[in-house]
Amino acid sequence: MRRGKQHPIAVLIIILCCTGLITCTSNNIKKQQKNSDIHMTDFPQQHDEAKKLAKTLKGKGISDERVLSAIANIPRHSFIDEQLSAYAYLDRPLPIESGQTISQPFTVAYQTELLQLKPGEKVLEIGTGSGYQAAVLCEMEAEVYSIERYYNLYERAKETLNELGYYPNLFFGDGFEGLPEHAPFDKILITAAPEKVPEKLLQQLRVGGWMVAPVGGKGGQKMTLIRRISENKFKKSEHGDFIFVPMQQGIVE
Ligand code: SAH
């Protein structure tokens, strides 16, 4: 079929789009996540390693295929220091800046599986850290909100996520306060350990909403699932022992 002649203005728009001088999609249209196969094909070797990691997690009992597929499609090495990249696809927690950690992939997968996240659900993460968990939530097509108390981590996570094409709503602040202006949330995921379940966050769950949090002191925490049954009724269950960095009050500029 012969192509018709392009109108000069159409040609100009195409050129500007291609050169990035105008964005073809607005930030709102840019989904919370992008199909990250595109990113992983940029890293063929790491893609193989990420797929292997997903397989390892399956062997350790993770069965939610959407969680496993997210893990297989996220370049975890992008979220850590280059010097540690040899360890990026091992099932291990790793240090990030400010004495914090990127959680062990099994823990990320386990918490995410417990949340039973459905596409389009509005989820609040406490403790953005490296941004890796937020990427998993984006891959699962959630509407993601995430708070970090260290300014440098907040900035760095934003840069990493946006470079990879993920656009969650990131906030620098104290997670104990939550985001009342964006509540209620379908799901809340805490990735640092509070000694007790934070009351303000419970109030930001919608009725029928679920929270997953590692609750306990320095000695270790119980992975806790809390479901809001009604305005004043919450149902709690415990799902194994974990060790997280503590959830701390206040912000660090
Ligand atoms: N989800 C992260 C894991 C980070 S570790 C990831 O995928 O990499 C936990 C994070 O919680 C740390 O970055 C820590 O600074 C943050 N944190 C601890 N207390 C917090 C609070 N009150 N509000 C927000 N973030 C907090």
Image (cartoon, rainbow, N blue to C red):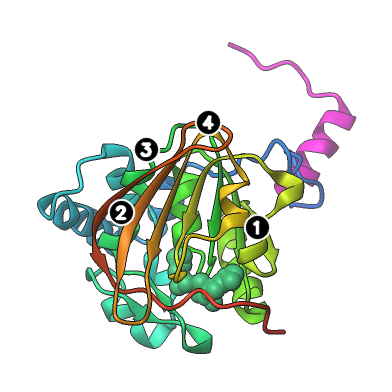
Badge 1 amino acid = Gly
* Residue depicted at x 39% and y 56%: 74
Magenta extent: 1-18
Q: Quadrant of residue 235?
A: top left
Looking at the picture, does residue 227 appear above or below residue 9?
A: below
Please, what secondary structure does the residue beneath circle 4 have?
loop
* Cα–Cα gap, marks 3 and 1: 21 Å
Q: Is residue 9 magenta?
A: yes
Please state if 244 lies on the left or on the right of 178 as rendered. left
User: How much space separates mark 1 and mark 4, taking CA atoms?
Assistant: 20 Å
Q: Residue 109 has which mark?
A: 2
Residue extending farthest to the top is 1
15 in magenta:
yes
Task: Name the image quarter holding residue 42.
Answer: bottom left
**Residue 116's disc number:** 3
Q: Mark 4 = which residue?
A: 230
Cα distance between the residues tagged 1 and 2: 23 Å
Question: Label 2 sits on what residue type?
Answer: Ala
**Main secondary-structure element of the magenta-colored stretch:** helix
Local packing at callout 3 (Cα closer than 10 Å; few below 14, some 14-19, many 20+) is few
The secondary structure type at the circle numbered 1 is loop
Q: Residue at x 47, y 48 (%)?
A: 137
Q: Position of residue 12 (x, y in %)?
A: 85, 38
List x then y, in percent, for residue 65: 26, 38
Q: Nearer the viewer, mark 3 or mark 2?
A: 3
Badge 2 crowding class, 10 Å Cα cut-off, few under 14, some 14 to 19, many 20 or more, is many
| Cα–Cα gap, marks 4 and 2 | 28 Å
Kindly report which numbered mark, 3 or 1, lies closer to the viewer in this rendering. Answer: 1
User: Which numbered mark, 4 or 3, is in the foreground of this view?
Assistant: 4
The amino acid beneath tag 4 is Ser
